Image (cartoon, rainbow, N blue to C red):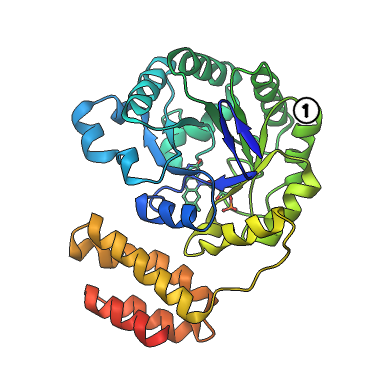
C-alpha cells in the first residue's frame, strides 16, 4: 500500500510522467497490467493557465484511466498555484511539481532542476499550490543540482522543509541535475533521505528497468514506493511482474510472443484513434523499438517496424514478427 494524501494505492509503485510518452494509450496499458496510478507528461504552468493553450496542449484526464496525476513545471509560485487549480478543476487526481527536469532550456529559465538550488522558492511554490488545491500534492526532485557539498545541503533543506507534511510525497531521482542520465542512479542518497526523514513519504526513482530491480531497490532502500519510468516504455508487463513480486507470487511467466504482438496492436490502435494517421505511425516507432527488445530476432523485427510508413504496414510488420 502507498498513501499519497487522501489517495491510497494498493501497491507501492506507479508509472512516472515521461514527456512525449505518457499519453492515454501508454497509461491505459500500464493500468491494465497493474499500475495503480499513472502520470501524464509534464506541462508548463504558464501554458496551463491560458484557456486556449490549455485546450490545445493538455489532455483531458478522461483520456486516462483514473486516478491520473498531472505534473507542472514553472518558477513562479503564483503561476504554479493557478495552474494546479486548473488541472484539479478539469479532473486530475494528483498534482506533482517538477523540480527535476535537467533540460538546458528549462534550467536557463529558472525552472525544473534549476530550483534544486533554491530551497526557499521550492517551499514557496508547494505552499502556494497546497493552499489552492485539495488533491494530493507531491514534488519531484533530483539527488541535488550537482555533486557539490552545497547541493547536498540544498537537497537536505528541501526535504527538511517538506517534512512538515505540506507535501504528500517526495519523489527523488537518484541522479543530480548536471548528471542528467549519465552514470548509475545513487540509491544510497535516496535511502539516506528516508532514514533521516522517516515521516516523509519517499518515492525512489532511477534505473528501475525490470520488476525484479524495482522490487529489490524498494526492499534495500526502505522507501515508501518506487517510480517506474523508462522500464515501462513498450513494457507494460513490468507492472504485472511487480504486482506478483509484492504479492509474494514470485517471478511470473514472461508474455508469449503472441501476447506481446496483441498488446502492440492494441497500443497502436489506441494511438491511431487519438492522432491523425500520418502522425500515429511515426509516434508509435519509439514504443515499437522498446517492444522489440524482448524479441529474439530484435534487429530484424525492429527494422521492419521502423521502415513502416503506413498504418497497414505497421500492422503487417507486427503480424509478421509476432
Ligand atoms: C523520455 C523521458 C521523459 C521524461 N519525462 C519526465 C517528465 O515529464 N517529468 C519528470 O518528472 N520526469 C521525467 N523523466 C524522468 C523519469 O520520470 C525518471 O525519474 C527517470 O527516467 C529515472 O528513472 P529510470 O532510470 O527508471 O528511467 C523522463 C525521463 C525520460 C527518459
Q: Nearer the viewer, residue 57 or 36?
A: 36
Residue 96: image location, x then y, percent: 49, 32
Q: Nearer the viewer, residue 171 or 146?
A: 171
Query: How many discs appear?
Result: 1
Residue 14: image location, x then y, percent: 56, 46
Query: In this image, 239 relative to 283: left or right?
Result: right
318 relative to 242, above or below: below
Residue 187: image location, x then y, percent: 74, 46
Residue 199: image location, x then y, percent: 74, 24
Q: Residue at x 68, y 50 (%)?
A: 185
Tell me if I can see residue 22 in this picture.
Answer: yes
Q: Residue at x 36, y 87 (%)?
A: 320
Q: Is mark 1 within 8 Å of ligand 1?
A: no
Task: Kindly identify which residue carries mark 1.
Answer: 198
Q: Residue at x 57, y 22 (%)?
A: 118
Tell me if I can see residue 145 in this picture.
Answer: no
Which quadrant does the N terminus fall into? Answer: top right
Query: In this image, 3 relative to 194: left or right?
Result: left
10 relative to 307, above or below: above
Query: In this image, 162 relative to 197: left or right?
Result: left
**What is the secondary structure assignment of the residue under circle 1?**
loop
Circle 1 crowding by C-alpha within 10 Å: few under 14, some 14–19, many from 20: some
The answer to which quarter of the image holds residue 296 is bottom right
Q: Residue at x 67, y 28 (%)?
A: 155
Amino acid at each position: 500500500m502507498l498513501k499519497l494524501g487522501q489517495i491510497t494505492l494498493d501497491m507501492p509503485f506507479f508509472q512516472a510522467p515521461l514527456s512525449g510518452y505518457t499519453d492515454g494509450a501508454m497509461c491505459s496499458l500500464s493500468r491494465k497490467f497493474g499500475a495503480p496510478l499513472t502520470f501524464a507528461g509534464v506541462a508548463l504552468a504558464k501554458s496551463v493557465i491560458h484557456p486556449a493553450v490549455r485546450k490545445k496542449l493538455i489532455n483531458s484526464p478522461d483520456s486516462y484511466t483514473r486516478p491520473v496525476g498531472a505534473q507542472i513545471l514553472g518558477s513562479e509560485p503564483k503561476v504554479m498555484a493557478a495552474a494546479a487549480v486548473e488541472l484539479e478543476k478539469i479532473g486530475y487526481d494528483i498534482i506533482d511539481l517538477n523540480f527535476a527536469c535537467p533540460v538546458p532550456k528549462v534550467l536557463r529559465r529558472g525552472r525544473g532542476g534549476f530550483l534544486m538550488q533554491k530551497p526557499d522558492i521550492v517551499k514557496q511554490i508547494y505552499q502556494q499550490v497546497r493552499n489552492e488545491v485539495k488533491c494530493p500534492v507531491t514534488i519531484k526532485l533530483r539527488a541535488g543540482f550537482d555533486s557539490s557539498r552545497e547541493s547536498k545541503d540544498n537537497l537536505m533543506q528541501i526535504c527538511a522543509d517538506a517534512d512538515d507534511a505540506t507535501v504528500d510525497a517526495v519523489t527523488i531521482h537518484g541522479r543530480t541535475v548536471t548528471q542528467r542520465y549519465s552514470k548509475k542512479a545513487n540509491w544510497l542518497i535516496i535511502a539516506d533521505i528516508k532514514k533521516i526523514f522517516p515521516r516523509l513519504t519517499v518515492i525512489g526513482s532511477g534505473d528501475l528497468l525490470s520488476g525484479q530491480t524495482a522490487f529489490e531497490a524498494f526492499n534495500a532502500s526502505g522507501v515508501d514506493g518506487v517510480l517506474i519510468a523508462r522500464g515501462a516504455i513498450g513494457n507494460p508487463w513490468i507492472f504485472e511482474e511487480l504486482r506478483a513480486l509484492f504479492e509474494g507470487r514470485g517471478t511470473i511467466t514472461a508474455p508469449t510472443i503472441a501476447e506481446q504482438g496483441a498488446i502492440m496492436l492494441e497500443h497502436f490502435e489506441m494511438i491511431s484513434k487519438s492522432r491523425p494517421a500520418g502522425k500515429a505511425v511515426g509516434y508509435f516507432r519509439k514504443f515499437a523499438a522498446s517492444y522489440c527488445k524482448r524479441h529474439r530476432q530484435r534487429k530484424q523485427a525492429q527494422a521492419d517496424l521502423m521502415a513502416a510508413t503506413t498504418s497497414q504496414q505497421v500492422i503487417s510488420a507486427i503480424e509478421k514478427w509476432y
